[in-house]
Amino acid sequence: MATRNEQALEIQGRRLKVSNLDKVLYPAAGFTKGQVIDFYMRVSPWLLPHLRDRPVTLKRYPDGIAGDFFYEKDAPGYTPDWVETFDVPRRARGEPIRYILINDLPTLVWCANLASLEIHPFLHKAPRIEQPTYVVFDLDPGEGAAILQCAEVAFLLKDVLDHLKLESFAKVSGSKGIQVYVPLNSKATYAATQPFARAIAQLLERQNPAQVVAEMAKSERVNKVFIDWSQNSDFKTTVSVYSLRAKSEHPFVSMPVSWGELKTALDTGDSGALYWQPPAALERLEEAGDLFAPLLTRKQRLPAEFAKSLAISRSDQGLKRRRA
């Protein structure tokens, strides 16, 4: 029998228990756990295709954004047997990690009920965990920089990708950054995509040293934008499109943006235009559809000689410095 703190939902033939729906998870916004679940249910037609067969890490906030959080990779022992999972070998020895696959609405709701505010999928799909379906450039503003500086760097990145005849798509992270995706849907492996991303980041750093940094050290990132190429790894995840974020007092959503919208925000200096809360995000999806849909099917090939030529160039420069 359901109590006030526990209710039963019938979703696609699955009976799910959800609890503490009135618990406030974003205090400043008064956004409750029930609203989190409702958002994920309503956004599911657009979100689920992007999660299909991708192992995910859940970022859970049992006591809301003001409380402690933790990343959950291994499916907990109480995971229902109808939730699909996929075993991924650990980098060190030991039992494989049993990742959850959010392949249907009941699984999505079950995860949301765990206060999984953020969903972080891999760039690859099971079972081909060595083949990312896209390259991602994570633009992260250092101290003194913000999302509009990331937008400027996104256009620098787009220019290079356009020159290489690679179509790219941008989304705001729902926090301070922007991510630029290059769909592949090919047989390319991380052994090719990470060097490619690193070469692009280092090229932009050399061309725009006042704006861009391609290395990890935070001391080098003040007033600059870090292009995190290392996200292109088989052990790293990136926040999903249409995922909530827990980075601020408000439940912002990681949303795709058109290059035109990004240009308008830059021209007007309106960073607020790059933030969506759930009602606005859902309204936009109803009106404009899924701007990230091409990532599901668009096939592109990396220019193999590009990274190789840059690597040779860097090697030659290093040799010259040693001789000098």
Image (cartoon, helix red, strand yellow):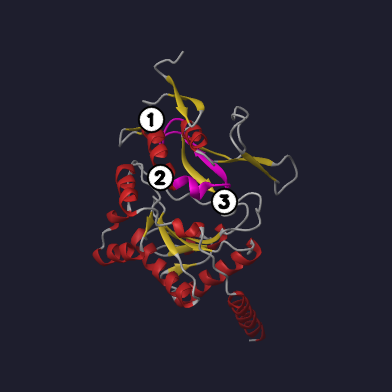
**Helix, strand or loop at mark 1:** helix
Q: Which residue is mark 3?
A: 122
Q: Which residue is mark 2?
A: 247
Q: Is residue 57 above or below residue 140?
A: above
CB of mark 1 within 8 Å of CB of mark 2?
no
Residue plotted at (57% across, 61% down): 185
* Of the image marks 2 and 3, the number of the one nearer the N terminus: 3
**Nearest the eye: 151 or 37:** 37
**Nearest the eye: 164 or 232:** 164
**Helix, strand or loop at mark 2:** loop
Amino acid type, residue under disc 2 in the picture: Lys
* Of the image marks 3 and 1, the number of the one nearer the N terminus: 1
Amino acid type, residue under disc 1 in the picture: Gly
Report the side of 210 relative to 80 (left or right).
left
Q: CA distance from mark 3 to mark 1?
A: 27 Å
Amino acid type, residue under disc 3 in the picture: Phe
CB of mark 3 within 8 Å of CB of mark 1?
no
* Of the image marks 1 and 2, the number of the one nearer the N terminus: 1
Residue 86: give x, y in percent of width and height: 65, 42
Report the side of 271 relative to 91 (left or right).
left
Q: Which residues are magenta?
A: 47-69
Residue plotted at (37% across, 67% down): 152
Residue 218: give x, y in percent of width and height: 49, 59
Would you say residue 243 is visible in this rendering?
Answer: no
Q: Which residue is mark 1?
A: 34
Q: Residue furthest top?
A: 1
**Nearest the eye: 285 or 26:** 285
CB of mark 2 within 8 Å of CB of mark 3?
no
